[in-house]
Image: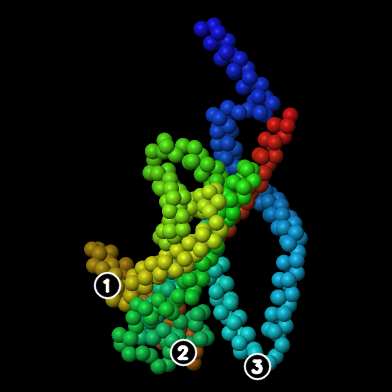
Amino acid sequence: MAEGGSECEQRHLLLNREHHNGNITDPHWLHDKKKKDREERQSIVLWRKPLITLQYFFLETLITLKEWTIKLWHRRGFVFSLLLLVAALSAAYYIEGAHQQYVQYMERKFLWCAYWVGLGILSSVGLGTGLHTFLLYLGPHIASVTLAAYECNSVNFPEPPYPDEIICPPTEGTEGAITLWTIISKVRLEACMWGAGTAIGELPPYFMARAARLSGAEPDDEEYEEFEEMLEHAQTAQDLASRARLAVQNLVQKVGFFGILACASIPNPLFDLAGITCGHFLVPFWTFFGATLIGKAIIKMHIQKLFVIVTFSKHIVEHMVSLIGAVPGIGPSLQKPFSEYLDAQRKKLHHTPASGAPQGESWLSWLFEKVVIIMVCYFILSIINSMAQSYAKRMQQRRNSTEKSK
């Protein structure tokens, strides 16, 4: 017993000495230290520490710009070639000639595709909280095209003003001419570009995990740390979330291309874990990105399009409005704004520039615009908080390195 007590005391003395020297190896202490650092970082938000958050955000922005400048300088040959290409395209854009009609057509298509690809990237790239651009932009666009197609009996909307504004063509189609496939074809380009953008946005977790595995360095990413902890405790996981993560990881690891395709083809909030898993187990880039692109830009996108188009089909919308009116007591008062909104949309579809401005927007349109503004503002705030916390993590790592070197 005395020997056991002596050994215990020696162990505590050794741990205290290692703790003092910054070389602590006790896993429980390391776990508590990481948890404390994480809580300290998460407290750095605009509504709690506005001045510190803004200061850290600007410092992190400067560091990020410096890092990107160094990377571009190392790839200056590629940057120079890109600048030459931009100069050539600019010359073709500004020089008058018969080619201008093709230039203008390509400009419209390029900007239209870039717009949706950019929204797709914002939806999945992991900046801040992520911007739900399908609910805010693509979904409403598909719904507007669907309602207009059934009202006009055509999808040949005049360009311009389409896609900025939808109005019926001068010669409308016959009743019943609109099919599900007609509407799908009309919105296919923007939907596929948005899906491709979401696939591109899934690449950072893949590259981060791959680089960490190849270099053996500890990555500056909490999701990857959680992934490694999950691998360590894979056999003892009990809660539903951990089992779901393990299921995704096992599917991707064992099935490969088709496992990634299956995860990418359905709305899956855990797909970031698929990217980290593929990077960690060194799945080839084109296997990961090819499956992700096919799943998100083709399969998943058609599922989401079908859902929106069917939901906003003419008979479904009319039935939903009638069901709202059937609610006891408050039904008629709830039904009125929806009916007014649909009537206003129909009138807008049939107005022409010569007929003057259409009737003012209903309060539903006003409310949706304000919801979009609020969500975009919250997205920007979350980016500021996230970058400030990244700088705080840099400081913590620097402090820990200094303590270890003592």
Q: Is residue 273 above or below residue 374?
A: above
Task: List the residue tagged with mark 1.
Answer: 319
Instruction: Tell me the residue that label 3 is attached to.
Output: 98
For label 1, the SS is helix
Q: Which mark is residue 352?
A: 2
Q: Residues within 10 Å of mark 3 (few under 14, many from 20)?
A: few
Residue 91 visible? The answer is yes
Q: Is 342 positioned to the left or the right of 25 in the image?
A: left
Front in this rendered view, residue 143 or 402? 402
Q: Nearer the viewer, mark 1 or mark 3?
A: 3
Residue 22 location, quadrant? top right
Q: Secondary structure under badge 3?
A: loop
**Taking the image as drawn, is residue 124 in sight?**
no
In the picture as drawn, the residue positioned furthest to the top comes out as: 2
Q: In the image, what residue occupies the spot 45% across and 75% down? A: 188
What is the spatial separation of the Cα atoms under label 3 and label 2, in whole angstroms?
A: 31 Å
Name the amino acid type tagged 3.
Answer: Ala
| Image mark for residue 146 | none
Against 75, residue 20 (above or below) is above
Q: Position of residue 130 (x, y in %)?
A: 52, 57
Q: Give the mark nearest the N terminus, 1 or 3.
A: 3
**Image quadrant where residue 377 sits:** bottom right
- The amino acid marked with disc number 1 is His
